Structure formats: structure tokens, C-alpha cells
Image (tube, helix red, strand yellow):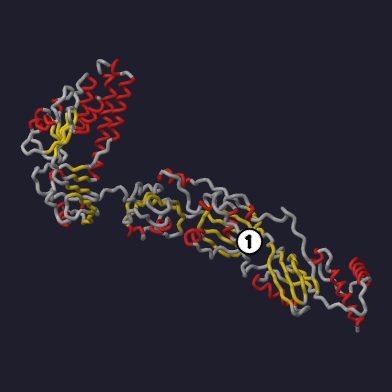
Amino acid sequence: MIRGLALLAAGLLAASLQFAAPSAAQLASPVDAGAGQGASGRGDIAQRRAAEQIAVPPVDVPAIAPVVLDGEMPQRPEGGGSTDVAQMPAPITPPPSEFETYVSTLAGQPLRRFGSELLLPSARDFTAPPTTAIPPDYRINPGDELLLGLTGSVQASGLRLVVDSEGRIFVPRVGAIAVGGIRYGDLHGVIERQVSRQYRGFNLEVAIGRQHGITVYVTGFAARPGSYTASSLSTLVNAVLAAGGPAAGGSFRSIQLRRGGQLVSDFDLYDLLLKGDKRGDAVLQNGDVIYIAPAGEEVAVIGSVNRQAIFELAPDETLTDAVLYSGGVNSVADNSRLMVLNGMSGADAGWREVSATDAGATKARRGDVVRILSQVGIARPLRQQPVLVTLSGEVARPGRYYVQPGTQMADVLAQAGGLTREAFPYASVITRDSVKHQQRLSYDRAIDDVELLLAAQPVTSVNRAQLAQPGNLALIKNIVDQLRRREPDGRLVFDLPVDAAALPGDLILENNDIVHVPARPVTVGVFGAVPSPASFAYRNGATVEDFVKSAGGIQKIGDKGEIFVVRANGTVLAGGKRALRAPALPGDLVYVPIDADRGEFWARLRDITGTLFSGLVGAASIAAISK
């Protein structure tokens, strides 16, 4: 009994030595029990002799250890094997087509076919990474490497078994197992059934260590047609992008996968790009052929849309479909109509307008350019503008008021509770954006005229040599720069009576109007060429000259003929002596300028700026420059 157990242990040890041979032996077919000739026979004799040399104590019998299977495959050398799709060079962007060049010129910016951004070298790689999880439906292919692990009554760790050309793997002490074409989800059960014929009470772990490359062919209108070696997990999209995608004349809408002469899938890349739908992106198999069809009818969508591009349309698709491919109209678009241009048709040359309703029933034609118009920068009629008005100053309830378009001043003031008893409507300040814009345009044009006239003085004057001095030219530039820095205020000036009790009630308000109603002023200011410029308490019945005398009268350098008065309502009273004789009003600002009439150049400058501004701004500029 004891001797029999010893012989059994020796036999198991000899078997373990036998399967410790190089792992390449795993790929060989099992040797028949009756084969005793040749090299395999000599190997068996050597193994038996080695087993007989192992001393087994006759009394101390060790426990029976589980069978150990050793069959780890050597690692593949670096750089060996076939080239994966992921190792292909970065895709090359196809050059623009003739239609792309035409539309880019029309749009004023580069415009490409929708989907071409996938082919840019900077685009994210769409190839299947090596860490991709193996899907259960994956079919085992010849050349795939399987990893097996066994615990329990039979032990093996790190078994690397390569599927041979006949779709089999060889498991030591188990034999050949046919796994080619089996779903990865069913692989565990297939191997487990075969091992259970030899052993009981074991646990099995199965995984795919490496997939064997497959060869596919990309044909048709591809940027780089040819044969490609891809991973077994690569899909139709991976191979198309590895081939550079569709060429300038290739279709994004019809990419056909053929297997054994049969059409497996006709994939539309727009489904992936616009909807995230990959149902037609089939997993490739060895020998598959991918055919990229020629491009269909193309139209361009430009203007106020979410994505300007050239789109390839399916048969019978409409103008509305083209706009939907562009992501629809954006927030500032005029969605009631669109403009269509077809330069390929002589009959319909030029832009034509199509309503949004008709666009859904109008079939798009090859070469159409669809433009969606923008509503930005379009001035709406007053009756259509939303109105926000700001009331401040002597108002019962100052604040910001939203009112209906076309609302009058009287209605807003009534909503705000009316004016207070201290209000002085004559001096009210009403500013408006549209007036400020118009003032800015007129002001800029006037400044350009001033600059031209001043620059021409050294040429047209009899004293051209004196006026052409560098200092004078620098002074001219300084004057113009100062004038350009001034900003119009957009004030509306109304010639109301000084004792008016209300603002102009019939004034139609515009959006962002600002209305400030001050309290009644109690002073009159006198400034400029006077000994004591100051603000003096208003005296009823006093004239402007009375207040000038209160400031010490006009100095010798003052210009009596150019004295002017800026009224509290924004109007200007000029004329020198005529202004002095006028009755003073509360809030008047009296200005006595310096006499600038000291030569032809300065006289001309005074005339120009006086005509341009005819008020405080121009006179103040002359006074500052003369000093």
C-alpha cells in the first residue's frame, strides 16, 4: 500500500517535470499513449529515469499536492507583430473642394464640410485604446492570446495560450479545446466543461490578454485608400478615420461595410456626429471591405446659425433639414425667413427669400447657399421697442420704470407720482441714446473738418513760413486730440418757459431714456476773464451785466464781443453786449472768454471752433489753448 502511494507521488512529480518544458510545447498536439518512438520516446525515457532517481521515504508519505500546470508563454518582442490602427499617422485634412472655396469666398471666412474637424491632426483620437473592455459578443479569433488561471484540485497561474490557425488552444493535461468563433461571454463555460472532464473541485478564470490584428480594406473615395491592420475590437469608424476619412469628393452619409460580398452596414457619420448614434458602427472582422461612396448633394448654411458649415443632404431633404443640421438658428436670428442663393442655376440667379413655412416644403438643390439673417443692429420702430425709463431728482417716486412702447412723458410722470413742489422743469436734463449716437457721428465729422482746416492753414496763409513751424503743427495736433476726447452727452434741449410747471408731456419716450428734474437753482455763475469768478445768489430782475460787475467786471484780456451765457435748460445766449443786457435767469452760467483775436491763425481757429460748438465747449477750449 505504502509502496503504491510512493510510486503514485513519483509519477505525479515526473508529470510536473514533463510540463515544465518550454511553453512552445503547449501549441503541439497531445502525444498518443502508444507512441514510443523518435524524439518524443527518448524524452519519455529520460523523464522516467529522472523520476526513478527521486528518493521517496517508505514510511513518511507526503500529502498528495494538487496538479500544477506550467505553461506561460514568452512575451512578444517589442516592435513585433502587425501595426494597429492606433499606430497609424495622424489623419491628414483633405484640401478644400471647389465648392468649399466658393462658399468661403461668399461667406467671407473659411468654411468646411461638416465633419471635417474629425480629420484634423489636433482632433481627439477615435481609435480603440488597448484598455478597452472586451464586449461579451466579441468572437475569439486565431492569434488571440488567452489568459487562464486555475485554483483548487488543479493549479495554474499565468497560462498564456494562443489560439492557433484552426481555432484551438492546448491546455496541459487537458488537451486541445476549440475556441475559435466562440463569443467571449461563452468562453468561460466552454473551457470549464473541457477541464471538468479531467478534474473536479477547481475554479477557473479566463481573460483575453491580447487580440490578434485583423486586415481590412478601405476603398472608394477615401483620403488614403488601402489595406489596414486593425485591432480585433476596431470598428468601421476607427478604420475610416485611420484612412484619413472621406476625401474631398467622398461621402459622410454613406460608408458601406461589406463582408463576404454581403452588405453588413451602410453607416451615416451624421448619426454619430449629430445624434451620438453608433448603432451602425459595426465591429470589424478579418477581410472586411469598407467602401466610401461619392458625396451626395451639398448645401451651405451661413449667417445666424449655431454652426456654419457645408452639409451633405440625403435625397429629398429640404431647406429646413439643412438648417437643422447646422444646429438651428441662434438667439439673434430672424427665424421668420431665410435667403437662398444658387449660383449654379442661371434661371434663379441672385438671392431669393423663402419663408420659414415654405422652407419645410422646398427641396434643397445641389449648390444652394442658405443664409439666415441677423436682427442685431436693426433699429425698431418706437412702437415696437421695450422701454426702460429712469426718473431722478424732484419726482415723487424716483426710480426705473418699464412702460409700453409709445408711452408719453406725461404718463410716466403720472406713474411716478408727478413732480415735487421744488421741481424746476425749465432746467430738466433728458438724455437719450439715439441722440448721443447722432451727436457722436456729427461731432466726429466736424472734428475731421476742423483738423483739415487747421492743417491747411500753413499752406494757404500768407504767413505760411511762420505757421509751418514744428511747434505750431504740434499745437494743431494737440488741439484736435483734445477735441476728440470730448464725449457728447445726448441731451435733449427744450425751450420751455422759465416758469414752466411740467415737462413736455407729449414727448414719446425711448428705451434707456434718463430724465433728471433738478430743484430750482439759487445762483448765477460768472467765470472766465473776470477778477473774481464765483457763483452769486440769484437776484430777481438783475441782468447778466449786473452779475459780471459783481465778479469785478471784464478784464483787459477779456473779449467783450464773445461773452455768452449757458442757460439752465441747455440753450446758449451769445452776442457779447446783447448777452450782457439780457435778464439773468436762475442757474445761468456766464462765461467771459479771453480775446483770442491776436493773429490770422488764432482768429481762424476761433471762428472754426466757435461755429462748431457755438457754446461753452468751444469757447472753453479756445480759452484753455490761448493761455
x and y percent of residue 374 in the render?
Answer: 33, 50
Decide which of 446, 214 is in the foreground and name it: 446
User: Which residue is found at the position 22% from the left and 51% from the top?
Assistant: 390
Where 224 falls versus 282 (above or below)? Answer: above
Instruction: For residue 518, say whether it is visible.
Output: yes
Quarter-wise, where is residue 554 in the image?
top left
User: Which residue is found at the position 19% from the left and 21% from the top?
Assistant: 597
Residue ID for mark 1: 131
Looking at the image, residue 571 sits to the left or right of residue 264; the answer is left
User: Which residue is found at the position 19% from the left and 25% from the top?
Assistant: 594
**Which amino acid, mark 1?**
Thr
Q: Element under label 1? A: loop
x and y percent of residue 463 in the render?
Answer: 26, 15
Where 98 falls versus 233 (above or below)? Answer: above
User: Which residue is found at the position 53% from the left and 53% from the top?
Assistant: 118
Quarter-wise, where is residue 364 in the image?
bottom left
x and y percent of residue 426 in the render?
Answer: 12, 44
x and y percent of residue 349 in the render?
Answer: 35, 47
Looking at the image, residue 13 sits to the left or right of residue 343; the answer is right
Decide which of 531, 310 is in the foreground and name it: 531
Decide which of 254, 379 is in the foreground and name it: 379
Label 1 packing within 10 angstroms: few (<14), some (14-19), many (20+): few
Instruction: For residue 37, say whether it is visible.
Output: no
Looking at the image, residue 156 sits to the left or right of residue 135; the answer is right
On-image quarter of the N terminus: bottom right
Looking at the image, residue 30 sits to the left or right of residue 383; the answer is right
